[in-house]
Image (cartoon, rainbow, N blue to C red):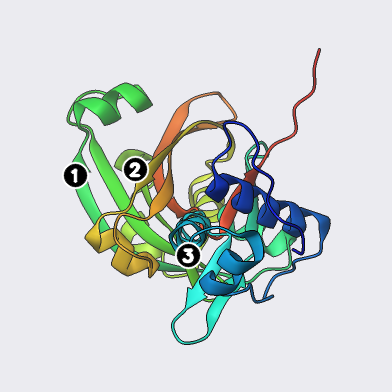
Amino acid sequence: MNRMIRDEEDVPFYKQLKNKILDEIESGKLKHGDKLPSERELAEQFQISRMTARHTLSILEREGVVERRVGSGTFINNNKIQLDFVTFNSFTKNMLSKGLIPSTQILSIRKMEATPNLAQKLKLPLGENMIAIQRLRHVNETPISIEESFLPEKLCPRLDEIITDNDSLYEILEREYGVVLVMAKEFMQITVSDESESKLLKIRSESPCIFQEAVAFDTNEKEIEFSTSLTRSDIVKFYSELKLK
């Protein structure tokens, strides 16, 4: 980054600097683990205020592009885990296919009655007996998401006694109950983590996260599972491939 930022019309200096850093990451000039100049050095190099440089780095940190280490500086964090938003697969298989090491910790298993929302999502009678499983997902020992699955108890009796940490829920459903999930309808939106979620994910409170809701279907196109997940946006990015007709 050896050229001055030009005063482009309607483009604030912080955004110009941010775009320049992103361009150098994209081009390969800046790689994962590289150290950025300090706020003072950026300010001097591009003739901007230190406040503008600090604001730029803060935005990049919130977006997971850089990591600021107290006493060490600011480093490029361009090593995001890529998740396929098109292919329906279990978390375990998805991570293993990328050469990553997945692990799962069960946070809670409880029985409950179907709420109006669950009954509507899974086309069940109100009050149907359900099993809810909340789990914390790790990749290479780093927590990345909190997931909760809701299933009718009649489809998987004693599931709470069978499933353990690191088990694949979908593999258990297929092996123990003959339930094969083949597709899902999924919705995604941006949210922020609350205090308890942040503690589990080891991020700052009110950090940007990706919230997903999904309904999974079996081979008969019957609704089987409703799930939610809260995923860290600083180390995960989603991928899809679209084709025009």
User: In this image, 15 relative to 28: left or right?
Assistant: left
Q: Which amino acid type is marked by label 1? A: Met
On residue 173, the disc is none
How far is mark 2 from mark 3, CA to CA? 49 Å
Sequence-first tag of 2 and 3: 3
On residue 112, the disc is 1
Q: Which amino acid type is marked by label 3? A: Arg
| Residue at x 65% of width, y 76% of height | 35
Give x and y (percent) for residue 145: 44, 58
Question: Is 216 above or below relative to 36?
Answer: above
- Report which residue position mark 2 lands on: 150
Secondary structure type for disc 2: strand
Query: Mark 2, mark 3: which one is toward the viewer?
Result: 3
Q: Which amino acid type is marked by label 2? A: Phe
Give x and y (percent) for residue 7: 64, 42
| Residue at x 70% of width, y 70% of height | 32
| Residue at x 29% of width, y 61% of height | 205
